[in-house]
């Protein structure tokens, strides 16, 4: 038995289904029932039922690429804020190798870096690294904070959404999996991108978003954008 | 012919309510920009803001739990919330309410999902008219849900009590002051688990049972409003 529809909005404690189904993310089992633990949208895949949260905090996972801000410089590492309950650290050896150098010559407090989560240990210490393509320090640009669960929506299917914004605003945009978005381009265009991204964040749970983003872009830029045949991205992916 | 009805079984209270009637209730979720979750609640003359921050990094090593998150609550009354100016700052009463609020909310939250972190709940009483601790808990649990914190259920709270010899629901300030007893109750409506139960005043065991049942009924009514408030925040357009 199932008591809710796919994509229905549920609140914590709502009974979703009985024991025929399996518990997915955002759900828990109580007695014979499966209940929601979050405010979010129901996603049913075969016999697995989960709830996609509308609001959440980023929990670091090994392999994620994130955007972080340097908050402190210690003897042999930088401390970074990665928009999460757990702060990260970047060992100096990752940047300098065996060489001993002044840490604040490389990155200073307030610098924004694009990093990879190398490891998260049992005590939730988040080790970050800079090894990889495109990782490093950002110069200029603005930061926009969105809910981490809405990152897939912002990117769209195969990057359709984010590429549309990039093409139309001619901005460089990088999205961290922790919900931090870096935008650099013409200051006017940065504002346009910011508005559009905030709109996506507000309306991530609604359908037909790609069209509305296209309309908003053409309105803000004052020109027509031809509609490509882009399939509607699925929030559940 | 004029029939004058005096004091029949459903006699009205000072404000015209029936014995099992709540005061007018309004809840709104997501009212603050900076907080991770927030709620504004009005019940009768009470006006309450609740804000939730977290789960966030905990710097106080002393209270950190390696296996779970800790919940910290602060209940605060604004100096202008009552008729006579209240001296600002925590006092004996607000420290107690802060503690019982944390205790009432704790069983519902999946704290083990965020070890070594903290969830901070702030309850600000802007205007008080009896039953602020219950209203505070109700508002705080809406704010927690709004913050996206995983919970077993939405904790909801309501008081019952005795005034003028009758057991009644949701006491106003007047009824609380001049009445015989006050029984605040918080429950998790789906399982029916009680997370807060206090009693102030004198009640016979029978009256206490009646008050408890009444309060639980009241909680269930408020619970519907809580859910509506959260769903309204995201509008009806989704589907």
Image (cartoon, coloured by chain):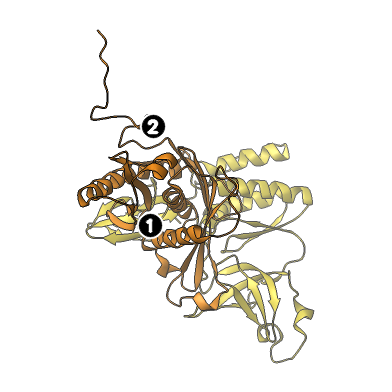
**SS at mark 2 in the image:** loop
Separation of disc 1 and disc 2 at Cα?
41 Å
Depth check: B6 or A165 in front? B6
Work out which residue is located at the far top of the displayed protein and give it. B1
On the picture, is A152 further left or further right than B175?
Answer: right
**Rendered residue at 49%/74% (across/down):** B116
* Chain ID for yellow: A
Residue A168: percent from the left, percent from the top?
A: 69, 47
Q: Mark 1 points at which residue?
A: A37
Residue B67: percent from the left, percent from the top?
A: 42, 76
Depth check: A165 or A200 in front? A200
Q: Name the residue under label 2.
A: B14
With respect to residue B14, does A186 lie above or below?
Answer: below
Total residue callouts: 2
Which of the 4 image quadrants contains residue A45?
Answer: bottom left
- Residues at badges 1 and 2 in contact (C-beta under 8 Å)? no
């Amino acid at each position: 038995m199932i008591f809710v529809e796919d994509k229905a909005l549920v609140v914590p404690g709502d009974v979703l289904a009985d024991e025929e189904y399996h518990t997915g993310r955002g759900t828990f089992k109580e007695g014979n029932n499966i209940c929601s633990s979050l405010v979010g949208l129901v996603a049913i895949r075969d016999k697995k039922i989960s709830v996609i949260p509308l609001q959440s905090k980023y929990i670091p996972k090994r392999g994620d690429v994130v955007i972080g801000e340097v908050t402190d410089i210690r003897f042999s590492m930088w401390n970074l804020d990665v928009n999460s309950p757990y702060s990260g650290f970047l060992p100096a050896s990752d940047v300098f190798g065996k060489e001993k150098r002044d840490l604040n010559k490389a990155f200073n407090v307030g610098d924004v870096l694009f990093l990879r989560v190398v490891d998260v240990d049992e005590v939730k210490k988040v080790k970050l690294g800079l090894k990889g393509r495109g990782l490093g320090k950002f110069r200029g640009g603005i930061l926009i904070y969105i809910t981490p669960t809405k990152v897939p929506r912002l990117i769209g299917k195969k990057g359709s959404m984010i590429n549309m914004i990039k093409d139309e605003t001619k901005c460089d945009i990088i999205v961290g999996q922790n919900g931090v978005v870096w935008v650099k381009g013409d200051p006017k265009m940065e504002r346009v991108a910011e508005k559009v991204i905030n709109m996506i964040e507000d309306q991530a749970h609604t359908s037909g978003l790609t069209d509305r983003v296209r309309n908003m872009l053409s309105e803000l830029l004052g020109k027509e954008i031809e509609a490509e045949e882009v399939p509607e991205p699925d929030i559940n992916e | 012919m004029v029939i004058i009805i005096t004091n029949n079984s459903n006699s009205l209270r000072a404000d015209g309510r029936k014995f099992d009637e709540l005061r007018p209730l309004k809840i709104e979720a997501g009212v603050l920009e900076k907080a991770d979750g927030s709620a504004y609640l009005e019940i009768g003359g009470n006006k309450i803001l609740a804000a939730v921050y977290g789960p966030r990094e905990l710097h106080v090593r002393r209270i950190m739990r390696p296996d779970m998150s800790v919940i910290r609550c602060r209940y605060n009354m604004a100096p202008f919330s009552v008729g006579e100016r209240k001296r600002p700052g925590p006092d004996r009463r607000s420290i107690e309410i802060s503690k019982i609020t944390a205790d009432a909310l704790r069983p519902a939250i999946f704290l083990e999902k965020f070890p070594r972190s903290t969830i901070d709940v702030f309850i600000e009483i802007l205007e008080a008219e009896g039953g602020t601790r219950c209203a505070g808990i109700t508002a705080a649990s809406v704010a927690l849900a709004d913050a996206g914190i995983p919970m077993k259920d939405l904790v909801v709270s309501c008081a019952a009590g005795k005034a003028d010899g009758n057991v009644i629901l949701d006491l106003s300030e007047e009824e609380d002051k001049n009445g015989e007893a006050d029984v605040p109750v918080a429950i998790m409506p789906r399982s029916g688990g009680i997370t807060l139960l206090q009693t102030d005043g004198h009640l016979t065991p029978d009256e206490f049972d009646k008050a408890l049942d009444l309060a639980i009924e009241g909680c269930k009514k408020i619970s519907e409003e809580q859910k509506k408030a959260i769903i309204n925040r995201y509008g009806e357009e989704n589907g």
